[in-house]
Amino acid sequence: MDEQKGKYADFILPREEMLEVGRQRSKLTIGVPKETHYQENRIPLVPDGAALLVKHGHQVLIEAGAGLAAHFADHDYSEAGAQIVYSPEEVFVSDLILKVSPFTPAEIERVKLRQTLVSTLQMGIQKEEYFRGLSAKKVTALAYELIRDRANTFPLVRAMSEIAGSTSIFIAAEYLADARFGKGKMFGGFTGIHPSEVVIIGAGTVGEYAARSAIGLGATVKVFDNAVYRLRRLQNNLGVRIFTSILHPQVMLESMRLADVVIGAVHAREGRSPCLVTESMIRQMKEGSVIIDVSIDQGGCFETSRPTTQADPVFQVHGVTHYCVPNIPSKVPHTASQALNNILVPLVINIAEGGNLDQYIKTDYGIRQGVYLYNGTVTSPLISRYFNLPSQDIDLLITGLH
């Protein structure tokens, strides 16, 4: 009877159960090198995330000092079960490399054949050699900016945008109160004192979280955007009625003349962000007012903007203080690293649970959209068009996977 039962067991088991029995988890080696880009203070994996990966049977290699700028010590990682290594070469033996900033030419040299790389892409600063160098290594590369979730949104971009929006208000408050760059004015609203006036250009995630923080501190907020649906969504998300307007130049100028703080939060899907505020408009702003150009990593939306650094973050034009540091989340690296970790660790675990990366790419649409190189082949039409590189549709490339 038992022999007969075993003979027909495959026919009795439901299909879902048969798949579960046949699935084999893969064990990965995950490497996290120390960031070398100037003023990149974030790290994609925090100690708690490393501990979770180790608990799932993976090996985690952290280059010594990789987390120090984000206030995560080497011993925090070693206590979590990660292995501390003392050269980037030791990290680059891993199956999967996690980084924040794009790979440098020196790092591309260290990349091994058919590795998996996950990092930001920052396509606006890349050159054709970047993609040709990675293609030669036959790697599969995913970009933070392209990965989607089940809601078809960009979770890593949104997380960093939320942080950038909130942080921009605290930066503005710091400089507004500064005796040299501001006018000794406390940000917000107080009994008997006119509240600070904040103009936000752009009603996306950065604009929404800047508005949340400004409202929370008691400021009067005005938001401008050319898309009415984004303004309506922002109103609904905030849960309070605020001044909103399309980008009408005269209305915006009148608001800027009264503003203590102007936040530039315009995001371009491709190429450079549009320049929406002219030097003439800035000349008419109050002396000691503050501009935070969050769009500076795409060129900036103020005519007078130019990139600055965290070591020398501000300059003045016509008495208006400009803060134009790209990568604002890196100013709060501890928080930003935890936000990255919370999205990346489940992704790595899902890759392993699915058996391997190829299978995960095949079954998860959002991750598939994040792939811009698959086994060395360019799969992003945007990259192909920008850099005149041949590409193939990833859906066709994975059709033959089993």
Image (spheres, rainbow, N blue to C red):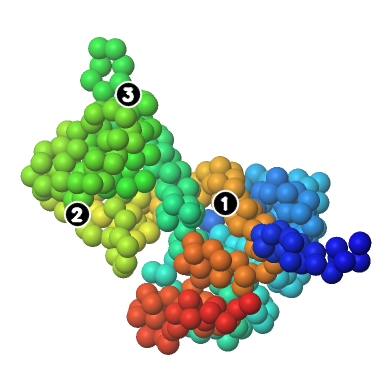
Name the residue located 22 percent from the left edge and 58 percent from the top edge: 275
Q: Tag 1 or tag 2, which sits nearer the N-term? A: 2
Compared with residue 55, is residue 169 higher up or lower down, i.e. above or below?
above
Q: Tag 3 or tag 1, which sits nearer the N-term? A: 3
Name the residue located 54 percent from the left edge and 78 percent from the top edge: 398
The residue under label 2 is which amino acid type? Leu
- The quarter of the displayed image where residue 110 is located: bottom right
Q: Is residue 93 left or right of residue 329?
A: right
Q: Which residue is mark 1?
A: 343
Viewer can see residue 61 = no
Residue 276: image tag:
2
Residue 292: percent from left, percent from top: 33, 45
Residue 218: image tag:
3
Given the current orientation, which residue lies at the most extreme top position? 192
- The quarter of the displayed image where residue 136 is located: bottom right
Given the current orientation, which residue lies at the most extreme right position? 2
Q: Tag 3 or tag 2, which sits nearer the N-term? A: 3
Residue 160: percent from left, percent from top: 46, 49
| Distance in Å between CA atoms under marks 2 and 1 | 33 Å
| Distance in Å between CA atoms under marks 2 and 3 | 27 Å
Given the current orientation, which residue lies at the most extreme left position? 250
Residue 302: image tag:
none
Residue 43: percent from left, percent from top: 61, 54
In front of the other: 329 or 233: 233
Crowd tier of the residue under label 2, counting other residues whose Cα lies within 10 Å: few below 14, some 14–19, many 20 or above = some
Crowd tier of the residue under label 1, counting other residues whose Cα lies within 10 Å: few below 14, some 14–19, many 20 or above = some
Name the residue located 45 percent from the left edge and 63 percent from the top edge: 146
Q: Which quadrant is home to the C terminus?
A: bottom right
